[in-house]
Image (tube, rainbow, N blue to C red):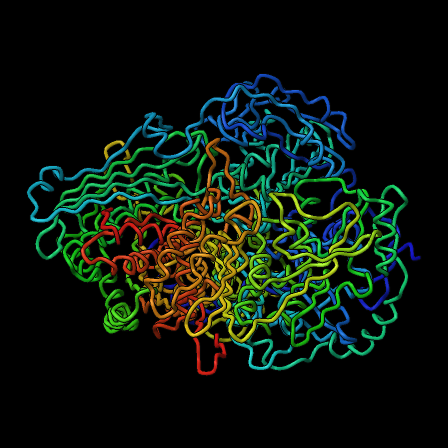
């Protein structure tokens, strides 16, 4: 067992063996290292001013991902390369993304700029051919700028990325890869004592043992939620068990029947699998949080924390996903929709750990649609999240699974409307009416800062209508403000 | 300034090529490298402590029954806990009215009003200790909304009105009348760097305070007042802010006062940096309004009479509400001539945080009312809204505003709008929108072209003054200081370009220095778009003084006439021939005991405003612009996308086109956020619940229109003698995206011709869907 975390920083391996279990990476940078280039804007992972880059090995290859350092626990960077804004300028001058921002007037007050620089640094290293404005917009959706109006920042991104990959980090990538590979060991990491610790088990066995010994410990996966308990609620979490080093827990694989997502797989990884089911999953996942949030946050975490407004559960419920839970007493599986019992109450026993999510593929006669309704298109929490999976034969709805977030204390299916829709003809909008009328009153949502109860009911109805219009392909008219979903010959989907 | 001097500088400008060029922001390299120092980044002196503010967590108003801070005092790391009684001077941080206590002791008037502060060894310890307070409030029912306050008839300031003729009578006689009532939301500044102050105590009760403020002088005065010391004992400095937008004008006072009070009490350096949630709960925002408009017009849509009632939520105290609401009234005409007119303003008192300055300072709300009125007339008369707008533009003979100032540049406004109408292809796109809407039932498009006319000058006339301090050192380098503050807008760079031009040196020789109350005193806030107009001119005057001395010296020393001497390109030329480098000249002049430092002072000419008599000329000039926006809405969900925007904007002779375009684009996107996604939501208890970026949604990159054409209007220059004939650019672009709102309104209106949509701002998806439902049901605004 190691008693220190190790990470690569400015070409050197740094070891830290003395920090609070909930110490954040941002506080480490600003208060301990005194690297003040990285800024705190909001302390909740929503503005991106604190963005840093983490270099990690994905299948042995070095990948730089943007991460919000304000809500990342320091211990989570074990085994990573930590890159901050101070590190980019070399002996030959500014980094290409920095230079492009200067040349194209991409900063005004400059406070958000280090975060943008680091997001663009990771974009630069993604080295995407044919990069579009929209690609850049999506990549920087987690970075707020209040001064420029973004246009010059996007221009700078396109300009900097045009020339291909050519910086000091790329030049020493092989060396970095081997250093990081050497840091990946099978040791458990335990920093602290038995009462206050950051513990990162390397095996599932050790995870279950330790959680069994410390059932009051806090499990942390991406820390995009737990991070706020620390920075905003100022909660003292003396015992932290981090899931990110558990061997196999983030593994995903797929076959013809479906997809198995390891519970600690990040959104960024899970998305690559889930989008093969239906393009709407891709569209919605690209709007969950931000690039930074998706690089850290996990599908498992989104489920396990039982949020009524998580975006994944409605989609997964509509698809009929199952989850697997394990403890030192054994393992069990259950349908995801049965996991959510009531607000803040899930079917999970003490010491039980969510281990995987199993998502079946659509059958040939199933049609899927998902919609995320928010005040702002990118990086916003849903007023309503809706997912529809209709089994259609000969133009008639044979069965329907329709699940919603934001309309109740838990993600919920519209059982009555589902029943009413069975037998409806796609070609006859009149036959949809009873389901539309029923669904408008099927939920009694809350009124809060995101939406009123009335609006939530209105869009639940509106989205069912939209889904039916799209699936029926009754007209060729546009149905979406952003993007387009059309049926084409042979049932393939185009977005 | 004399026209003569101005002409001379214009010649010099073309020679030196420093002014008018797109130099990058002076700190651009430091921004991208992470080396630009904000106050929280400064190296902390030994023993620095941290301040966190404390307030009742649940209630908005009522008597304080018990304030038990024993657990707070006992908490780890706590050095001091201070209450109102610990304030040695005057317990007030208001800008003028004396109605904003730093800390309260008997009752709270809004949720977030401060009761105490904690000073601790670390920021985290201070924040944790605050949570241990036991505060019991005898809660009363708060007045939260504009409607609440209207009903209760509570105001913070007297009503005010502009009147010409008898619009009540004229309205009754007009062939056509329209009325509309709507709500217009407020806005959180969301500067990326939150409120921040760092106070370092010195000897003899001196206090040096680094404050993230647009108004160092007011912070200085506030601290002196709160500590009960002379203003001369307090020095306030600000090198840069991480954004401000009006939110660090009066709103910076309290945090600086807390830091200074803590430093005074402990004798140690004290930092106060608000957590983002506290920042959003505890500081004022753009005023939200309920507006009623009515107009009478003839068959062509030409207005005969207008009545506008502007009812704003000011919050619990006056703050800057007088000027803000006045400016709303000054802009309720926007670009339109109202023959008979009555504009009335009510400044309502609520149990919410006191609303404050925000880019546009009330102007946007007034202008929005004018544009809503134009749309109402167009929909009612079945005309193209652009035609109605143009029919009512100020023109020769019809160029007097409701407050009596004449609009001299109405030709610029008309020409600019004509040009944009052509370049945006408005007419053809209007037809294309109609075709699209005929073919689509779920999605609807809308288009609008709206103008901006914004008055430049502080309407509180005495604020229109500025100072600068310039030193020429013996190596030829120039130290530049002035009263303006840098919040990202590029003021420092613009003024440096001016100073370089005036001194005849290259830009690299001009050292930009932090704004500091001990260098330039009695300054005005960097606000009202006036930063460059005022400080640029003050700096130019200081430079001219030094240049004048150098020339006089040179003429005597080299026995030539002053007219033969020219300073440019870091050189002194005599009859066009190089004689000395600026370094040699400075050294020589020093040896001949020439004074190489100068202050400069400027006051805006021509303006005078008699508020009592509603008479005068409040503005030196107007800035103009126009924008054309096209949007698409989803009638099933209310979602909206801005598809294309074209902007044409008048900055006179641009001092720096890149910085000006940055202001225009940034202002546009910020204004678009105000009118679309940014919603302030208070619960029934009067607590703001959108107090973090997770719940309060400013635009992201995706919200920026894919097609976003921004062009500077080819101007002959400001007809008024401003610095190099430039025009102010800070605030006016904020109002350009009113066209986005009007385009959304146009899209909704397409669902039921002739019916004015019941669309409130911000036009969130919910507000849009509500308007869609209402118009389908035939409900009228």
Can I make out residue B546 in this image? no
**In the image, residue B435 above or below residue B503:** below
Q: Residue at x 47, y 57 (%)?
A: A418
In the rendered image, residue B516, in percent from the top left (x then y), is placed at 58, 44
Q: Residue at x 49, y 29 (%)?
A: B110
Q: Quadrant of residue A428?
A: bottom left
Q: Nearer the viewer, residue A100 or B115?
A: B115
**In this picture, residue B371 sits left or right of residue B73:** left
In the rendered image, residue B391, in percent from the top left (x then y), is placed at 16, 58
Q: Nearer the viewer, residue A73 or B170?
A: A73
In the rendered image, residue B269, in percent from the top left (x then y), is placed at 71, 36
- Looking at the image, the residue that sits furthest to the right is A1
Can I make out residue B667 in this image? yes
In the rendered image, residue B270, in percent from the top left (x then y), is placed at 69, 36
**In this picture, residue A154 sits left or right of residue B32:** left
Q: Nearer the viewer, residue B678 or B528?
A: B678
Q: Quadrant of residue A467?
A: bottom left
**In this picture, residue A190 sits left or right of residue B73:** right
Count of marks overlaid on the render: 0
**In the image, residue A341 above or below residue A118:** above
């Amino acid at each position: 067992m190691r008693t220190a975390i190790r990470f690569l920083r400015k070409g050197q391996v740094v070891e830290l063996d003395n920090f609070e279990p909930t110490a954040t990476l941002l506080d480490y940078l600003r208060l301990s290292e005194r690297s003040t280039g990285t800024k705190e804007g909001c302390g909740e992972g929503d503005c991106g001013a604190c963005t840093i880059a983490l270099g990690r090995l994905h299948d042995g290859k070095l990948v730089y991902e943007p991460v919000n350092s304000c809500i990342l626990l320091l211990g989570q960077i074990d085994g990573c390369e930590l890159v901050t804004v101070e590190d980019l300028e070399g002996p030959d001058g500014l980094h290409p993304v920095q230079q492009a921002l200067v040349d194209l007037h991409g900063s005004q007050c400059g406070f958000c700029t280090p975060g943008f620089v680091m997001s663009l640094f990771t974009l630069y290293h993604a080295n995407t051919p044919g990069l579009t404005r929209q690609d850049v917009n999506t990549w920087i959706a987690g970075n707020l700028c209040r001064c420029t109006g973004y246009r010059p920042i996007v221009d700078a991104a396109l300009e900097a990325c045009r020339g291909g990959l050519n910086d000091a980090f790329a030049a020493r990538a092989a060396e970095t890869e081997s250093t990081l590979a050497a840091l990946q060991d099978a040791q458990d990491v335990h920093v602290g004592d038995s009462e206050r610790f950051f513990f990162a088990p390397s095996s599932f066995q050790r995870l279950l043992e330790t959680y069994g010994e410390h059932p009051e410990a806090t499990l942390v996966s991406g820390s995009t939620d737990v991070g706020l308990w620390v920075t905003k609620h100022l909660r003292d979490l003396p015992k932290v068990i981090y899931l990110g080093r558990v061997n196999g827990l983030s593994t995903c694989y797929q076959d013809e029947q479906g997809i198995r997502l390891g519970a600690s797989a990040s959104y960024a990884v899970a998305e690559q699998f889930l989008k093969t089911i239906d393009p709407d999953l891709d569209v919605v996942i690209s709007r969950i949080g931000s690039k930074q949030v998706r690089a850290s946050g996990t599908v498992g975490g989104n489920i396990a924390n039982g949020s009524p407004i998580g975006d994944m559960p409605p989609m997964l419920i509509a698809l009929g996903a199952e989850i697997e839970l394990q403890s030192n007493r054994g393992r069990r599986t259950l349908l995801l929709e049965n996991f959510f019992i009531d607000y803040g109450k899930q079917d999970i026993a003490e010491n039980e750990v969510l281990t995987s999510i199993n998502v079946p593929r659509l059958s040939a006669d199933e049609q899927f649609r998902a919609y995320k309704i928010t005040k702002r298109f990118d990086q916003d929490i849903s007023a309503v999240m809706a997912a529809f999976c209709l089994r259609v034969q000969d133009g008639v709805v044979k069965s329907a699974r329709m699940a919603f977030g934001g309309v109740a204390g838990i993600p919920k299916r519209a059982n009555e409307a589902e029943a009413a829709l069975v037998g409806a003809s796609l070609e006859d909008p009149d036959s949809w009416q009873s389901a539309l009328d029923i669904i408008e009153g099927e939920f009694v949502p809350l009124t809060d800062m995101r939406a009123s109860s009335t609006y939530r009911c209105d869009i639940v109805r509106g989205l069912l209508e939209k889904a039916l219009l799209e699936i029926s392909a009754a007209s060729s008219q546009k149905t979406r403000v952003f993007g387009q979903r059309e049926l084409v010959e042979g049932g393939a989907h185009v977005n | 300034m004399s026209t003569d001097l101005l002409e001379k500088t214009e010649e010099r400008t073309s020679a030196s090529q420093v002014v008018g060029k797109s130099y990058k922001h002076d700190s651009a390299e430091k921004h991208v490298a992470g080396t630009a120092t904000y106050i929280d980044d400064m190296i902390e002196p030994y023993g620095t402590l941290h301040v966190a503010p404390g307030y009742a967590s649940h209630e908005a108003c009522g008597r304080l029954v018990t304030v038990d801070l024993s657990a707070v005092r006992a908490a780890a790391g706590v050095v001091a806990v201070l209450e109102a009684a610990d304030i040695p001077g005057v317990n007030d941080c208001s800008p003028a009215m004396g109605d904003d206590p730093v800390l309260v002791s008997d009752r709270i008037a809004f949720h977030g009003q401060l009761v105490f502060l904690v000073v601790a060894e670390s920021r985290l310890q201070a924040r944790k200790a605050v949570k241990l307070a036991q505060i019991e409030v005898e809660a009363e029912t708060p007045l939260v909304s504009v409607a609440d306050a209207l009903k209760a008839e509570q105001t913070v300031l007297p009503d005010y009105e502009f009147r010409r003729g008898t619009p009540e009578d004229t309205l009754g006689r007009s062939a056509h009348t329209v009325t509309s009532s709507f709500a217009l939301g407020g806005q959180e500044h969301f500067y990326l760097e939150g409120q921040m102050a760092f106070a370092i105590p010195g000897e003899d009760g001196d206090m040096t305070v680094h404050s993230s403020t647009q108004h160092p002088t007011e912070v200085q005065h506030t601290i002196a007042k709160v500590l009960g010391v002379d203003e001369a004992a307090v020095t306030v400095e600000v090198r840069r802010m991480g954004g401000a937008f009006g939110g660090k004008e009066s709103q910076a006072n309290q945090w600086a006062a807390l830091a200074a009070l803590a430093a005074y009490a402990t004798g140690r350096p004290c930092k106060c940096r608000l957590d983002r949630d506290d920042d959003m709960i505890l500081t004022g925002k753009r005023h939200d309004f309920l507006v009623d408009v009515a107009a009478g017009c003839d068959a062509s849509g030409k207005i005969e009479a207008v009545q506008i009632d502007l009812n704003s939520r000011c919050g619990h105290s006056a703050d800057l509400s007088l000027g803000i609401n006045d400016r709303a009234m000054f802009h309720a005409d926007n670009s339109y001539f109202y023959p008979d007119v009555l504009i009335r303003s009510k400044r309502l008192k609520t149990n919410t945080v006191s609303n404050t300055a925000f880019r546009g300072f009330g102007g946007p709300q007034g202008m929005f009312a004018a544009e809503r009125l134009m749309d109402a007339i167009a929909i009612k008369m079945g005309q193209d809204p652009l035609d109605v707008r143009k029919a009512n533009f100020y023109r020769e003979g019809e160029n007097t505003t409701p407050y009596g100032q004449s609009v001299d540049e109405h030709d610029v406004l008309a020409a600019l709008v004509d040009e944009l109408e052509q370049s945006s292809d408005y007419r053809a796109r209007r037809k294309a929108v109609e075709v699209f809407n005929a073919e689509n039932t779920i999605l609807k498009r809308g288009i609008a072209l709206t103008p901006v006319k914004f008055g430049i000058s502080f309407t509180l006339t005495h604020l229109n003054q500025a100072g600068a301090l310039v030193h020429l050192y013996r190596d030829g380098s120039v130290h530049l200081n002035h009263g303006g503050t840098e919040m990202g807008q590029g003021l420092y760079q613009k003024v440096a370009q001016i100073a370089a031009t005036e001194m005849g040196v290259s830009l690299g020789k001009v050292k930009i220095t932090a704004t500091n109350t001990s260098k330039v005193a009695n300054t005005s806030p960097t606000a009202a778009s006036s930063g460059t107009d005022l400080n640029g001119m003050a700096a130019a005057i200081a430079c001219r003084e030094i240049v004048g001395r150098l020339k006089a010296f040179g003429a005597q020393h080299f026995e030539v006439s002053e007219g033969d001497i020219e300073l440019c390109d870091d050189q002194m030329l005599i009859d066009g021939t190089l004689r000395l480098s600026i370094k040699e000249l400075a050294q020589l002049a020093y040896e001949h005991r020439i004074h190489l430092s100068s202050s400069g002072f400027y006051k805006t000419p021509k303006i005078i405003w008699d508020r009592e008599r509603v008479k005068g000329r409040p503005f030196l000039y107007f800035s103009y612009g126009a924008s054309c926006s096209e949007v698409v809405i989803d009638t099933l969900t209310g979602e909206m996308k801005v598809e294309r925007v074209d902007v044409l904007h008048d900055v006179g002779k641009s001092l720096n086109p890149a910085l000006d375009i940055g202001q225009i684009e940034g202002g546009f996107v910020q204004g678009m956020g105000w009118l679309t996604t940014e919603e302030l939501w208070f619960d029934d208890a009067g607590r703001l619940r959108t107090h973090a970026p997770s719940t309060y949604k400013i635009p992201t990159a995706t919200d920026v229109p894919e097609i976003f054409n921004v062009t500077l209007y080819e101007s002959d220059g400001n007809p008024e003698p401003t610095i190099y004939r430039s025009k102010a650019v800070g605030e006016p672009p904020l109002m350009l995206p009113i066209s986005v709102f009007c385009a959304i309104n146009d899209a909704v209106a397409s669902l039921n011709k002739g019916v004015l949509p019941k669309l409130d701002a911000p036009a969130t998806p919910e507000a849009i869907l509500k308007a869609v439902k209402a118009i389908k049901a035939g409900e009228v605004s």
